[in-house]
Image (cartoon, helix red, strand yellow):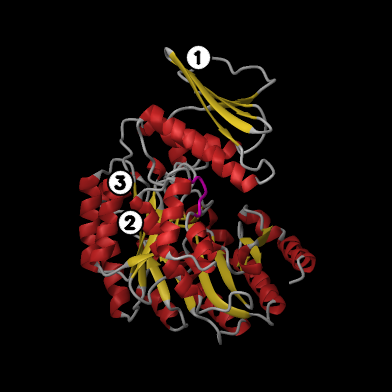
Amino acid sequence: MSLQFNRRDFEYDVYTLVGAFYPGSRIKTWYEGEEAPEGEFAYYYSINYGQEQITFSMNGPGRSQFACCRLKDAGDRTETKNQLKRLVYRFLSEQTGKELPWGDLTGIRPTKIPMRLLEEGWSNVEIARHMRETYFTSNEKTALAIATANREKALLSQLDVEKGYSLYIGIPFCPSICLYCSFGSHPLKQWGHMMEPYLESLFRELAFISGRMSGRRLNTIYVGGGTPTTLEPPQLERLLSFVQEHFSFEHLKEFTVEAGRPDTITEEKLEVLRNHPVTRISINPQTMNQKTLDLIGRKHTVEETVETFHLARRMGFDNINMDLIVGLPGEGQEEVGATLKAVRELDPDSLTVHSLALKRATRLHLFKDQYEDISFENSEEIMRMTKECAMEMGMGPYYLYRQKNIAGNFENVGYAKVDKAGIYNILIMEEKQTIMAAGSGASTKFVFQQGTRIERVENVKDLKNYVERIDEMLERKRKGMELYGI
Ligand code: SF4
């Protein structure tokens, strides 16, 4: 379909909404005054912003329609955006007969709305009414967003978000690259020789951060990637010892190591983690169906997941998260049901359910023609199944976010038992606290005034470049901190 704008404003919101009503359709956007795109389109949409009103119109097979709304205050961008989205949503909903679970919300952090309103003293009932009337969110998603925001707020109240900060450490190596990976991880076989030089640079960056942040309280640490447990036991030991020597743990609430891939976890590595104050680990099956694991390039077995989970439990890990992905190729309700049954038997402490996102930089996207005979299914029913499984294990939602290109316009939800939530996950989503990030591709986020202002300093993504240009990475951080008065 063709989507024409008369000015460069709010294009992403309109584009995303049209895409959500017509999943899988190709949308060609263009601007008034430009040459019309070549080809025939089933529908021609156009949006026209005037001084006082916005018009949304459609020319389709055998019919034309339009709708317009008078702007309440053209100078108020937030209100204008809300009015525009409501107009487009109502129009498309009428045209397609569909309602979207998240209504006209197009952002990736839907809990930010209830969180802000809770902080302003609104009641849950008032927030629910506001969300349904303003954004047309379904009852179920409204309840999910409000429940999550309440739990986030309670968890964050344990921290001094202004004085504290969090630390992210990236280990960008994996045993093999998953079909859907968009993290820019590096397969060990080709890149294993870079591990030592990488650690050297990483230690320099960590030492820099510890020196510059010595006056602030470190609240959470997250070691992610990649797969941190691709490090050999002595390397893991050196990394964790280095962190312990250089940072004060006096105010530390959480120390997560994302073990991630079961094929990298050994008793020796878990022993290293036990010898340091790691409070939370993640063992991620993604699916408990071997056929799918083979297809998506995760070179581990279902048995390995089960065995490493039991091993970790026996060794005393009392806060284990498991990540699942729904919408994986070839998986429908039956396959997801089998995964949930196996996970329920293991009884982890938290469960993070991701909806598959078809990002451009993934192998799945690059070679999508090879997978055109395989179905990619996610549905409200599948999301409900995952929620029920989490509830049966005594978990409730504690963080959620959405991604662009997510299968079926759904969301990613973190569920956890009481006292087992991953606080770092909330901090990264709600953007309430500064996160100092070390490693290739790591993005440091300086958060001011409870998230009303955010500034970023990025490291280069390329592993080799990170190692070779580590001085420049430190300089970027130093300059950023100077500029933002940290
Ligand atoms: S384990 Fe995670 S980081 Fe590693 S390749 Fe798979 S998706 Fe990417």
Task: Find residue 421 and report its horizontal and vertical position in percent.
Answer: 40, 71
| Residue contact between numbered discs 1 and 3, judged by CB atoms under 8 Å | no
What amino acid type should be assigned to the residue bearing mark 2?
His
Residue closest to the eye, 264 or 329? 329
What amino acid type should be assigned to the residue bearing mark 3?
Glu
- Name the element at disc 1: loop
- Name the element at disc 3: helix
What amino acid type should be assigned to the residue bearing mark 1?
Glu
Q: Earlier in the sequence, mark 3 or mark 2?
A: 2
Q: Which residues are magenta?
A: 105-109
What residue sits right under mark 1 in the picture?
40
Relative placement, left or right, of 90 versus 430 is left
| Neighbour tally class for label 3: few under 14, some 14-19, many 20 plus, Cα within 10 Å | few
* Residue 140 visible in the picture: yes
- Magenta segment's dominant SS is loop
Residue closest to the eye, 282 or 383? 383
Q: Is residue 330 above or below residue 269?
A: above
Residue closest to the eye, 223 or 294? 223
What residue sits right under mark 3 in the picture?
380
Relative placement, left or right, of 285 versus 46 is left
